[in-house]
Amino acid sequence: MSILRDLFGPGTWGTGGNLVAWVICGVLGVIGTYLLRHRIGRNLAVWWNLHHREHAVEQHLEALRRHEASKREDGTT
């Protein structure tokens, strides 16, 4: 009981202060991120596509060109 009074005693967070707040906020953040991971991933993918589409298309076309060139060098079609 003394530990609880020390951690959550007088004042905002007691003598445990920021340590308790960091742990509680950290745990809530991890749980929230885990539960919303699919939504976060979709939103990040949309953002990435909006900001990097042209560059990604250029990289993809260059990779296709290199692949076709290597197939021609090997003699396979």
Image: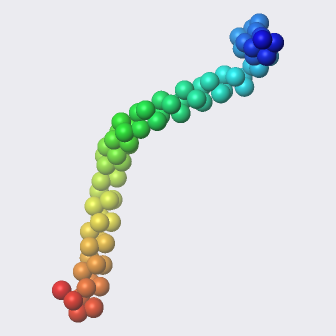
When the figure is inspected, residue 41 is found, relative to residue 73, above or below; the finding is: above
Q: Position of residue 54 (x, y in %)?
A: 29, 57
Q: Furthest residue to the front?
A: 1
Q: Quadrant of residue 36?
A: top left
Q: Residue at x 31, y 72 (%)?
A: 63
Screen quadrant of the N terminus: top right
Q: How did the renderer colour the structure?
A: rainbow
User: Residue 4's quadrant in the figure?
Assistant: top right
Residue beneath the point at 26% across and 76% down: 65
Image point 66% across, 22% down: which residue? Answer: 21
Residue 14 appears in the figure: no
| Left or right of residue 68, residue 33 in this image | right
Quadrant showing the C terminus: bottom left
Q: Residue furthest top?
A: 10
Number of numbered discs overlaid on the protein picture: 0
* Residue 33 visible in the snapshot: yes
The answer to whether 58 appears left or right of 12 in the picture is: left
Q: 4 above or below 72?
A: above
Q: Position of residue 62 (x, y in %)?
A: 30, 71
- For the residue pair 69 and 11, the one nearer the viewer reads as 11
Residue 58 location in percent, x, y?
A: 29, 64
Q: Position of residue 33 (x, y in %)?
A: 47, 34
Q: Between 2 and 39, which is closer to the camera in this rendering? A: 2
Tell me if 75 is positioned left or right of 25 in this view.
left
Asked if 67 appears above or below 50 in the picture, the reply is below
